[in-house]
Amino acid sequence: MTIFFYVLIVLASLALIASILLQSGKSAGLSGSIGGGAESIWGRSKGRSFEGILSKLTTISAIVFVISALVLTALQ
């Protein structure tokens, strides 16, 4: 049972690392806020874009990581 949670933690951490590194950085300054606002209004839906998928993958892998770490701690 513990081997399953060790494997789950490793897979969740690899997915978490990959999804964080693949996300683009936030633009700083006034030009980034203007461009980002226009892009969100006229651009594709954020939920269906590559950034939206990476954001969901980051959230899911973080939740899986935390839950599996807590369960593994409780088992020991």
Image (cartoon, helix red, strand yellow):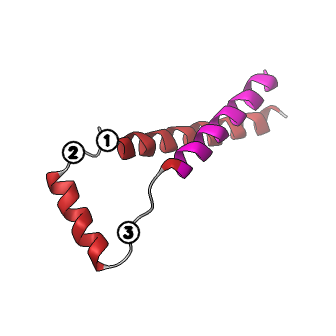
> Which residue appears farthest toward the left when viewing the image?
42
Disc 3 marks which residue? 27
Q: How far apart are the two marked residues, 1 and 2, measured between alpha carbons?
A: 7 Å
> Which residue appears farthest toward the top when viewing the image?
1
Where the N terminus falls, by quadrant? Answer: top right
Disc 1 marks which residue? 49
> Which residue is pictured at 45% across the width and 61% down the height?
25
Q: Position of residue 22 (x, y in %)?
A: 51, 48
Pointers 3 and 2 in contact (C-beta within 8 Å): no
Where the C terminus falls, by quadrant? Answer: top right
Relative side of 47 to 12, left or right = left
- Amino acid carrying mark 1 in the image: Ser
Main secondary structure type of the part rendered in magenta: helix
Pointers 1 and 2 in contact (C-beta within 8 Å): yes
- Amino acid carrying mark 2 in the image: Arg
- Range shown magenta: 1-21
Q: Is residue 61 above or below residue 3?
A: below
Residue 11 or residue 25, whichever sits in front: 25
Disc 2 marks which residue? 44
Quadrant of the rendered structure where residue 32 is?
Answer: bottom left
Q: How far apart are the two marked residues, 1 and 3, measured between alpha carbons?
A: 18 Å
Pointers 1 and 3 in contact (C-beta within 8 Å): no
Q: How far apart are the two marked residues, 3 and 2, measured between alpha carbons?
A: 18 Å
What is the secondary structure assignment of the residue under circle 2? loop
What is the secondary structure assignment of the residue under circle 3? loop
Q: Position of residue 26 (x, y in %)?
A: 41, 65
Dot 1 or dot 3: first in sequence order is 3
Dot 3 or dot 2: first in sequence order is 3
Q: Position of residue 27 (x, y in %)?
A: 38, 68
